[in-house]
Amino acid sequence: MCLTLNSKQIKRTELKPATHFKTLYGPVRSGRLGLSLGVDLLGRRICSLDCIYCEVGPTRIHTLQRRPYMPTRTILDELRAWKSQQLPRPEYITLGGLGEPCLNSELAQIIAGCRDIFPDIPVAVLTNSTLLPDPAVRRELAGAQVVLPSMDTLVQSEFIRINKPCKDVDLNSMVTGLLDFRKEYSRQIFLEILLTRGVNDSEKNLALLREFIPRLAPDRVDVVTMTRPGASPLAEAISDRTLSEWRSALCTAGPMSALSQVGQVNSERNAGMDLASGPVDGHQADLLHKTSEPLSDDAARDLILNSLRRRPQTVDQVRAALGLDGARTETLFADLFAQGLIRHAHELGEDFYQVAP
C-alpha cells in the first residue's frame, strides 16, 4: 500500500514525546510467539554475523566480544515505564534487537529483570547460535522460557556466503553448542531456517538438516524465506514450491510438536519480532486493546516510529501488529511522511516504510 499524499489530506501536527522508548518496540504479532514486545539488547547493528538477508541492514560492529552494549538498568527502567503506562500487554517479552542479543554480557540480569517485572509473561530469546559453544552463555539462556535459535545451513561454503561470520565463528562448534544446549535445557526450543535462492537451498543442506533435526529434537521448526528487503541485493526469496518441499521434508525429520505451516515470513532473529501479513485474530486484538484508555495519536505515532526504526514495514503490517484502525493508521503514516520522519521504497512488490535518516 502506497499512500497518496496531498496538503488537503494531511493535518500537520507537531509530534510530542509520548511513549518514546530506546530499547522497546511493538508489541507486534509474531508468527511463533503471538503478541510480542521486542527488547533491543544492543542499540546498534552489532553482530557476530553479517547475513545477506538481514532486514536491519549490514552489520556495523562485527564481533564475538561480549559487552553490556545496552545496560540492564536502561532496559528494565523502560519495561517498568511500559508497565506503569498500561500500554498494550504482550504475550511474550522477546529479547532481540539490531544484532545478536547474546553479545550483551548482562543477558542473565536482563532475563531475570524481565521475569521480575512481568512475572506472568514468558521471556523468549532470539539467537543466531554463534555463542552457544560458550557454556556461560548457555547457562544464561537457561533463564528464558523459550529460546529461538537459527541454523540456516550446515554446509560450510553456504554458511560463509549467507551468514558472513566474523573471525573465530566456527560452524561445527555452533552445531555442537546447540546440541549441548538442548541436553541442558528442558524448556521450548523453536528452530528457524531461513532460505535464500541459490545460496542455501541445496540438496546437500536439506539432507544435512534432515539428519540434524532429530538430534536436536526442537519443539518447533520454522522454514522461512524473505518477504522484506535484505542487506544485500543478492539475497532473494525462494519459490513457494521450494519452500513447501523443504517444509514437507523437515516436518517428518524429527519428533517436533509443531511445525510452521503458515505463509512466508521473514526472519525474527535480528528485529526481535516477525510481522505476518493478515489481520490480528480476536485473541490478539483483545490483548492489544487491554489498556486503561485508547492510545492517543502521539502515543500511536511513537509506537510506529519505534517499530520502523528496527526494520522496514508496510502500512498493513504495522496496522495489524498494533491493532489500529486502517483509516487511522493511514492518517498517522501520512502525518509522519509529511513531516519527513519516514520514507518509503517499493521493493518485493510492496511499499515498505522506514524511519528517515
Image (cartoon, helix red, strand yellow):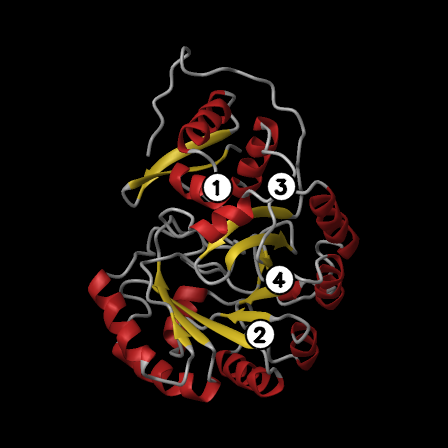
Q: Where is residue 333 in the image (x, y as percent from the top left)?
A: 46, 29
Viewer-closest of 332 and 149: 332
- Work out whether 34 lies above or below 356: below
Residue tagged 3: 291
For the residues labelled 1 and 3, the Cα–Cα distance comes to 12 Å
Give the crowd class for mark 1: few <14, some 14-19, many >=20 residues within 10 Å.
many
Mark 3 / mark 4, whichever is N-terminal: 4
For the residues labelled 1 and 2, the Cα–Cα distance comes to 43 Å
Residue tagged 1: 323
Q: What element carries label 3?
A: loop
Q: What element carries label 4?
A: helix
Cβ atoms at labels 3 and 4 below 8 Å apart: no
**Residue type at numbered disc 4:** Pro
Instruction: Report the side of 10 relative to 13 (left or right).
Output: left
Answer whether residue 212 is visible to the viewer in this image.
yes
Residue tagged 4: 101
Residue mark closest to the camera, 2 vs 3: 3
